[in-house]
Amino acid sequence: MGFGLLVFIRNVTVQKSREVQSRKKAKSGSAYKEALFLVIFIFTFIPLIGPIFDQGENNQNFSIYNDDWNGASDFKKTIEVDGYDVMSIQSSLSATERLDNLNKSLLLVL
């Protein structure tokens, strides 16, 4: 009976130590997953939250939407006064091939 009790106690303590070790492994793995999820979540919503902080102002140098000293909004207004349509191309130069009315002249400012 004494030997059987020792075997039972040993089995119970071994089982508990295995459970504790598996919980530690699960917690450490889930911590990495939570951190990765948080980083992905933040980077996903930065484009949506960004305009709240800069209030939608465009202060890029030489932008046709920038009204400051380093913007090209005056240049845009001058061209529009002359009767031209002004568009900004946000993609590659191949976008100019898709423009309507190809018989018009095209002024491209880089």
Image (cartoon, helix red, strand yellow):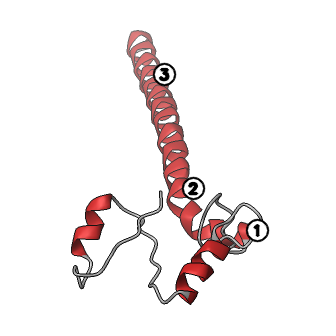
Q: Earlier in the sequence, mark 3 or mark 2?
A: 3
For the residue pair 34 and 19, the one nearer the viewer reads as: 34
- Disc 2 or 1, which lies upstream in sequence? 2
Q: Which residue is denoted by mark 3 in the rendering?
A: 13
Question: For the residue labelled by badge 1, is the local secondary structure a helix, a strand or a loop?
Answer: loop
At x 39% / y 15%, what residue is drawn?
A: 7
Q: Which residue is mark 1?
A: 68
Question: Where residue 20 sits in the image (x, y, percent)?
Answer: 51, 29
User: Residue at image x 38%, y 15%?
Assistant: 4
Image height of 20 relative to 77, above or below = above
The residue drawn where x is 50% and y is 37% is 32
Query: Which of the 4 quarters of the picture holds residue 87?
Result: bottom left
Question: Disc 2 designates what residue?
Answer: 42
- Measured along the vertical axis of the image, is residue 54 above or below residue 36? below
The amino acid marked with disc number 3 is: Thr
Q: Residues within 10 Å of mark 2 (few under 14, many from 20)?
A: few
| Front in this rendered view, residue 21 or 12 | 21
Q: Report whether residue 60 is seen.
A: yes
Spatial CA distance of label 2 from label 1 is 31 Å
Residue at image point 48% right, 23% down: 17
Identity of the residue furthest to the top in this view = 3
Decide which of tag 3 and tag 1 comes sooner along the chain. Answer: 3
- The number of numbered discs placed on residues in the rendered structure image is 3
Q: Vertical placement of 9 versus 72: above or below?
A: above
